[in-house]
Image (cartoon, grey):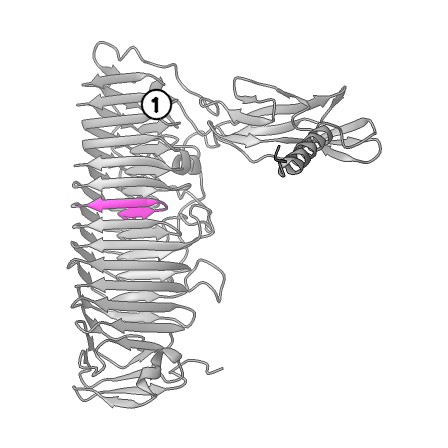
Amino acid sequence: MKKDSTFPIYFGLVLLWITSFIFSTQTTSAGTLSSIQIQPATPPKLLAGQTIQLTAKGTYSDGAIADITSKVSWSISDTLVATISATGLVSIVESAGGPGMPGMLGGPPPDGTFGPAGGPPPRQGDDSPGVRPRSNNSSRAGQPRPSGAGPAGGPPPGGGPGGGMPTPSVVSIKATLDGVTSPSVSLTILATEGPAIYLQSGGNVSRSNQKIIASDKNTSGVKVTDKGTFTLSDSNVATSGPTTAMEYSSFYGLNAAVLALSGSKITVTNGTITTRGTGANGAFAVGNGSVVELSKVKIDCLASGAHGVDATIAATIICTDVDITTAGHGAAAAISTDRGGGTVTFTRGSAYTSGTRSPGIYSTGSITVSNAKITATGSEGIVIEGKNSVALKNITLSCLKQCGAMLYQSFSGDADVGTSILTITGGSLTAGEGPMFYITNTSAVIDIKDGAKLSAVSGTLINAAAGRWGNTGSNGGRLTFKADGEILTGDIVCDNISSVTAILQNKTTLKGTINAEGTAKVMALTLDATSVWEVTGTSYLTSLTDQDVTLANIHDSGHTIYYDSKADVNKWLGGKTYPLSGGGKLRGRWPLKNQDPF
């Protein structure tokens, strides 16, 4: 019989497995257990629905330390707030972390009205005190502004009658083995939720022709939790109470008029949402799987910290034919995402903001706006923070203050560090002051195409420069700017720690001066053979790439353009001086103006 040559291999593997199993089930110490330590000893604060893995380390009489996570008996002080598995995985109960009113699944009173009779109090005047949601060092200490605008004003965070934050829940966790018990570890569950007039936990409910009115602080009109589904049509939701914890309102929807949590979905059609208190967002979704969908809804938010719609922590908001107005001074963008990111899709409709430091669109996630009108009279049109994006398609956007769009990175932790992306397809953007695009303390990509019309009253198309965010000396802007089939007017400005790469293609025309002061760390221009640069003043390029080697697509109007004669990318120019068709010159130079040759 033929001998099986693989038998010794199989036998060896089996023997190795048995040996490993025996040793893995034995204690690594011959001593007795003397103490148990739970790690991490100071767990981070958690929200309802979140989990955290704890481990247990045992110390023995002979000094040995072993992982005994799966051997100990775990105990927790309040299983209504959190549970813990045999392997140390802690799960925060979905409804933990805040007060609430009893579920009202049976529907409203016969008159179809929730809340106090008579409706909310009269509208506040414009002189109502504003509340700034964060300190001077955070990104939304008022919505961020371009360099030179000065520190944001306003009183300190918090505010509202009563003050203070909702009380968090605290549970104690211990581990026990062989008569030895660990010191307890305290776990804090943030009380991010307030009560609501209509509160639904789970289930599938539909209502129509309702008036839902809330006047107390920290109180929502509608709140749905625990994967519930709620459909509301032909109804009005109005709140007037302030928040007592502005950051909780910004991050977790405390005090929002309509609030979806923990994988729930709220659909509102043919209705109105009105808020008058500080931190009272119109419609808010928080947490992965949470969705708010609005159709033919009017939203009016009047105070500071009150966004029209806001999605955080991977939630989703979908708006179709929605009209939003906000009037708050500071952190009152009409269309917004906040900490943890989120996705907002806004189709048709309009958004109008009149407050200072309250842009039309603020993204720390992914926001797409199509066929809509966006107006900001006291702030930027668009702000993108960190590794996030805004995509605009066939919209009309106008703003009167600061700049058209600001792309930046703060220290707040609201947004991951990375590349900010702005895509503009068709439509029009008008900036009443400042540059059309301001980039600071971040890398960014701006892609303009399909005949988008851009107009900056200041005459500056792009400004990449250090501002009041980041570490001095390394907080410049780094922009890749792509234009496809565009007619652009405006100068490109760049400071000595910033860079701009401009790529013009498919019959794009740029009329303006590039790097007139010669300060840019990097100023690279790429032209395809169909695109044209109409030069309006002396310009300085660290890099020039032109598919038209005759340079006929550079319309100089008698101006001189300097290029870096030492850069490898410019070798095709050979360090020479070239006469241009309009009487100007393309001249090699090193160093470029205001650059250190060393």
Task: Count neighbours of disc 1 (C-alpha within 10 A) and say few if under 14, some if 14 to 19, many if 20 or more.
Answer: many
Looking at the image, residue 49 lies above or below residue 475: above
Residue 147 position within the rendered picture, expressed as x and y whole percent measured from the top left: 38, 62
Judging depth in this view, the residue of 246 and 121 nearest the camera is 246
Looking at the image, residue 174 lies above or below residue 156: above
Looking at the image, residue 246 lies above or below residue 515: above
Judging depth in this view, the residue of 530 and 275 nearest the camera is 530
Viewer can see residue 316: yes
Kindly identify the residue that appears in the image at 57 percent across and 25 percent down. 170
Task: Write the start and end of the magenta stretch as one range.
Answer: 357-370
Kindly identify the residue that appears in the image at 28 percent across and 26 percent down. 266
Look at the image and tell me in which quarter the N terminus lies. Answer: top right
Viewer can see residue 41: no
Is residue 170 found left or right of 273 in the rendered image?
right
Magenta stretch: residue 180 in it?
Answer: no
Number of numbered tags placed on the structure image? 1
Spot the residue most to the front.
1
Is residue 71 found left or right of 470 in the rendered image?
right
Magenta stretch: residue 361 in it?
Answer: yes
Residue 220 position within the rendered picture, expressed as x and y whole percent measured from the top left: 34, 26
Under circle 1, the secondary element is: strand
Q: In the figure, residue 59 lies in which quadrant?
A: top right
Judging depth in this view, the residue of 19 and 173 nearest the camera is 19
Residue 114 position within the rendered picture, expressed as x and y whole percent measured from the top left: 27, 17
Kindly identify the residue that appears in the image at 22 percent across and 72 percent down. 528
Given the image, on which type of amino acid does mark 1 rest?
A: Val
Residue 356 position within the rendered picture, expressed as x and y whole percent measured from the top left: 30, 49
**Residue bearing the label numbered 1:** 224
Q: In the figure, residue 289 lies in which quadrant?
A: top left
